Image (cartoon, rainbow, N blue to C red):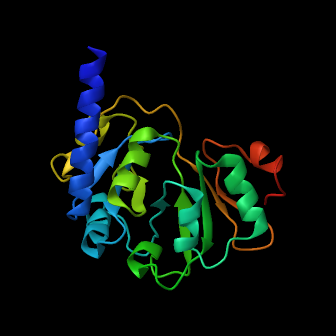
């Protein structure tokens, strides 16, 4: 029985990689909540995320990566303090906001000069990123203003048939990621999520 479940998940991952590579949208479990993904290298797929989420295009979308070495592909500068947070909390439920390279699409940055990145601690998410071969957009799989989805069924209930694939590997157990802006000298806590301000304060000053 276990082998069948594992095989089923692997089949879903392989299909998810194929969908993402061809410009489709995939919902998938992460270590926080269900994510909605598109290949960061396919602009029309990223634009479609804004449409299906009913999200303002002025709001930037985060990028999910498989390993810290990919951060330099999208960020123009990563301070020693930012690297300290990466070493302490990633992979995990921390999203860090960094100065963006000009090569990062304005569709992803919402027209701004920063980019948000995270390395999820979940095997399905990591397998998708590695399979696509580049960071994927990984925003929460919910309609704007609606509760975050913790199960595949909750994703289906909000989006219906608007997505190309929903990978089901069970319930996500955590809150959204904590978001910290590290573009300045002192990190700014933009959203307190699964990682508390107290935990962050053990590593660095936080405002």
In the rendered image, the quadrant that contains the N terminus is top left
| Residue 172 point in image, percent of width and height | 44, 33
| Residue 50 point in image, percent of width and height | 32, 66
Indicate left or right for 184 with 38 as reference.
right
Name of the residue lying farthest toward the left: 161
Instruction: Name the residue: 32% across, 68% down.
Output: 46
Name of the residue lying farthest toward the bottom: 102
Residue 101 quadrant: bottom right
Say whether residue 159 is visible.
no
Q: How many marks?
A: 0
Instruction: Name the residue: 31% across, 58% down.
Output: 53
Instruction: Name the residue: 57% across, 66% down.
Output: 71
Indicate left or right for 120 with 146 as reference.
right
Residue 151 quadrant: top left
| Residue 26 point in image, percent of width and height | 27, 51
Foreground residue among 96 and 110: 96
Whether 160 is drawn above or below 102: the answer is above
């Amino acid at each position: 029985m276990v082998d069948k479940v594992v095989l089923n998940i692997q089949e879903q991952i392989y299909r998810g990689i194929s969908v993402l590579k061809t410009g489709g949208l995939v919902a998938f479990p992460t270590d926080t909540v269900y994510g909605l993904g598109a290949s960061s290298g396919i602009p029309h797929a990223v634009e479609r995320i804004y449409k299906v989420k009913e999200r303002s295009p002025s709001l930037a979308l985060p990028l999910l990566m498989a390993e810290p070495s990919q951060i330099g592909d999208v960020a123009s500068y990563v301070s020693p303090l930012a690297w300290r947070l990466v070493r302490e909390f990633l992979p995990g439920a921390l999203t860090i906001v960094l100065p963006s390279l000009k090569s990062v699409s304005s569709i992803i940055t919402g027209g701004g000069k920063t980019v948000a990145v995270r390395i999820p601690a979940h095997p399905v998410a990591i397998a998708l990123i590695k399979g696509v071969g580049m960071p994927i957009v990984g925003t929460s799989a919910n309609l704007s203003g609606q509760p975050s989805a913790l199960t595949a069924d909750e994703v289906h209930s909000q989006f219906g048939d608007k997505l190309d694939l929903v990978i089901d590997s069970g319930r996500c157990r955590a809150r959204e990621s904590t978001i910290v802006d590290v573009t300045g000298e002192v990190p700014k806590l933009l959203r307190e999520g699964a990682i508390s301000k107290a935990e962050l304060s053990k590593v660095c000053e936080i405002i």
